[in-house]
Structures are given as structure tokens and as C-alpha cells.
Image (spheres, grey):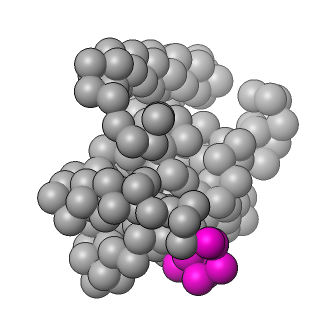
Amino acid sequence: MLESLTQLVSGSPWTYAVVLAFAALDAVFPLVPSEATAIAAGVLAGAGDLHVALVLGAAAAGALIGDNGAYGVGRGAGRFMPRRLLRGRQAWAERMLDERGGLLIIAARFIPGGRTAATVTAGLTGMHWTRFVRAAAAAAALWATFAVGLGYAGGQAFEDKPWLGLIAAFSLAVTIALAVELTRRRSSSTHASPLTA
């Protein structure tokens, strides 16, 4: 996977479009390696092959576009789903989004698969779009800064061997994602929700 990723993410100006597209697609298709792509582009920016501001902008814009697409999928699906299927779960989801909507959208961005679940659910439950887009924009900016910044630091540290920077940055990102997921699982085992019932 790393080899095909490094072929896609190069010093070419097309890399910015690849970063944007992967970040957008990941919202609906969580198997797209958007974070790895943003980290790899950050490594190249740290090594001087790309402009870091453009990589950050492409990653954040793609993430925001993708989140809006997933929100739209949720809005559309909500019109066709039988009400009895949503009754208890929708009430719980709406309450959670009303109470902690912005925080949930931001936190979900850093949980594997959480981004898609949170953004689709926001659309499904009818979360107001302006409120959603504010939280999604903040989440996109934080995520892009994290992923690209991690890669950039790796590219700076291993300027002569950017592939070492990619491995170091990607390993750190995986470690952080695992720590977040373990914390979330421990927390959810003590607080069961209607979604797990």
C-alpha cells in the first residue's frame, strides 16, 4: 500500500488534487486512505517538494466537501427510511447532536469510521446545516493540521530520506488513532447507548 501511495503522492502539482479528492471520498468511503495521503504529502512538503499551505488547504477543503456530501446522503436517506426504524435511535441521536453536536462532529473526525457515522447521522436527524458546517469546518481544519503537520515534521526531520519521515509520521498517527479508539471503547462500555441496543 505504501508503494502505491508514494506513486500517487509525489512532487507533482497533481498531488494537491489527489489530497483533496482522497479527503473528500473518505467521508463516504471510509476505506480511502485520506489520512495517509495527507501525511505523505506533508512529508513531501517538509522535504521541500510541495508547498505546505497548499497541502493544508487541499486536505481541509477535501475534508469539508466530503463531510457535506455525507451530510447530504444522510438528509436524503432520512426521507426514505421508515419512521418506525428510526424512532428510538433517532430521538437519542437528535438529543446527542443538540447537546454536543459540534464536539461530536470534531471528535468523530479522529475516530476510525466515526467521521462517516457522525456526518451521515447529522444529516439523517436534520441537524441544522449552518451549525453542522461550522463544526465540520473546524474538524476539517484540525484534522488537516494534524495529518499534514505530522508529515511535515517527519519530512523536516528526515529531509534526506523522506520515506523514513513517512513511516515515522504514519506510525505516530496509527498509535494516536488506536489510543483514541481504546479510550472510546472503554468509555462506551461504561455508558451503553440506544444505538448499541
Question: As displayed, is residue 30 above or below residue 91?
Answer: above
Q: Quadrant of residue 57?
A: bottom left
Residue at the far left: name it: 99
Is 173 in the magenta?
no
What residue sits 49% from the left and 70% below the top?
A: 124
Question: As displayed, is residue 62 above or below residue 79?
Answer: above
Residue 91 seen by the camera = yes
In the image, is 108 to the left or to the right of 32? left
What residue sits 50% from the left and 22% below the top?
A: 174
Picture coordinates of residue 192, whole percent (x, y): 33, 29
Question: As displayed, is residue 138 above or below residue 178?
Answer: below
Main secondary structure type of the part rendered in magenta: helix
In the image, is 7 to the left or to the right of 93? right
In this view, the residue in front, 16 or 64, is 64
Picture coordinates of residue 7, whole percent (x, y): 81, 42
Picture coordinates of residue 35, whole percent (x, y): 55, 42
Question: As displayed, is residue 78 above or below residue 148?
Answer: below
Tag count in the figure?
0
In this view, the residue in front, 38 or 93, is 93
- The magenta-colored residue range is 73-82
Q: Quadrant of residue 20?
A: bottom right
Q: Quadrant of residue 181?
A: top left
